[in-house]
Amino acid sequence: MHSADLSALYLYLCIALANRAQFCYNKKCMNLVFFDIECASVYKNTAKICAFGYVLCDGQFNIIEKEDILINPKGRFHLTDGRGEHGLVLPYEYDKFKTYPVFPQVHGKIRKLLEDKNNLVFGHATINDVNYLDLETRRFNLPSFNFSFSDSQLMYMTSISDFTRQFGLEYITKDLDVDFTPHRAADDAYATMRVTQTLCAKYNCSCAEIEKILGIRRGYIKNHRIVKPDSSGYAEYRTNCKREKEERAKRRNEFYCTVNGRHRAKSTKFKDKVFCFARPLEDCVDVSIPLLEKIFVLGGKYSQKLAECNVYVCEENDVSVRTQSAKLCGQLQIVTPKELGELIND
């Protein structure tokens, strides 16, 4: 082989290796996009977006861009909080929104940001914002978005193994000591980034790695079909809740089968007494059914309606809804299961 051919081959190999190294670097060091959306109004089939805020940063959380894209929602502002109550105020000048571009005019920029294959997309309760984007594409007859996304709320809940409620961004930032200005979209996106950064620091890992550590499965939107993110911990929690619900229903059925069964009184001791148990006590059939059977033997009756009973049975520390209502009924005699046992054996 001639020296010129060897030089050309050497140059080709150098370029190929450089390209491969650059590919591996890019794959490892993907950029991160954190976004948040504010709407002028949200209904079942419409969500009129007025602000799309985002933070674009590298894999080490160095910010490349931070922007609030303000949008003319083409509709009135009708703001409610998470409970659907009025009073939510966004930190923007509402009168200026008519001067901003409408969604179709910024749709391309948002799409490019979210669908870039070199970007990992995150939000907080992200499924809501993705749904808002989808509703706007439908309203303006635009093609569906197509990207995957993760959720800082789900990551936080998984990290503390608490899925009993949805933790708001304000709560999480306070718990993790992160600065937070609520309801300005770009600031919410920045707070989401800081939450994710703090969780990565906790586990000493990258943003991509934390999903594997926490067992997170990314959500996605494609052809207007939206699949929410999930985690192995949350899936296990739902399974346990379903099993507990089924077991509770089984116990409740057992209790009320006893209530509705045929009974023969052997005494008139409880002739004029109608009993009602707290719901947690009803579910504890090992205690409630023996007490119930003794009540019937002594001539008493049972009703789940407070208005029909004159003796209410609950544990001292019970705070169930039925017990709270019972305590507001001045005419009820309230006793504990232990005290009921003493009445039975008296």
Image (cartoon, rainbow, N blue to C red):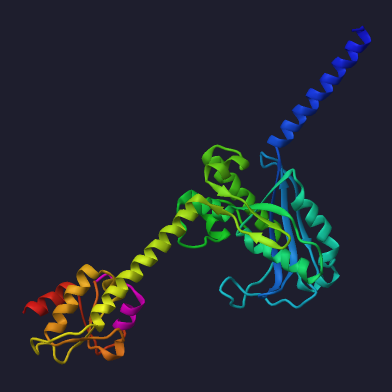
Image coords of residue 145 (percent x, y): 75, 58
- Looking at the image, residue 267 sits to the left or right of residue 139; the answer is left
Identify the residue shown where x is 52% and y is 60%.
167
Image coords of residue 49 (percent x, y): 74, 68
Quarter holding the N terminus is top right
Image coords of residue 307 (percent x, y): 30, 90
Number of numbered discs on residues:
0
Instruction: Between residue 29 and residue 56, name the one nearer to us.
Output: 29
Q: Which residues are magenta?
A: 316-327
Quadrant of res 340:
bottom left
Image coords of residue 164 (percent x, y): 45, 61
Quadrant of res 82:
bottom right
The image shows residue 186, relative to residue 59, as above or below, that is: below
Instruction: Between residue 113 and residue 299, name the one nearer to us.
Output: 299
Instruction: Between residue 157 and residue 292, name the one nearer to us.
Output: 292
Quadrant of res 24:
top right
- Looking at the image, residue 204 sits to the left or right of residue 310; the answer is right
Identify the residue shown where x is 8% and y is 86%.
266
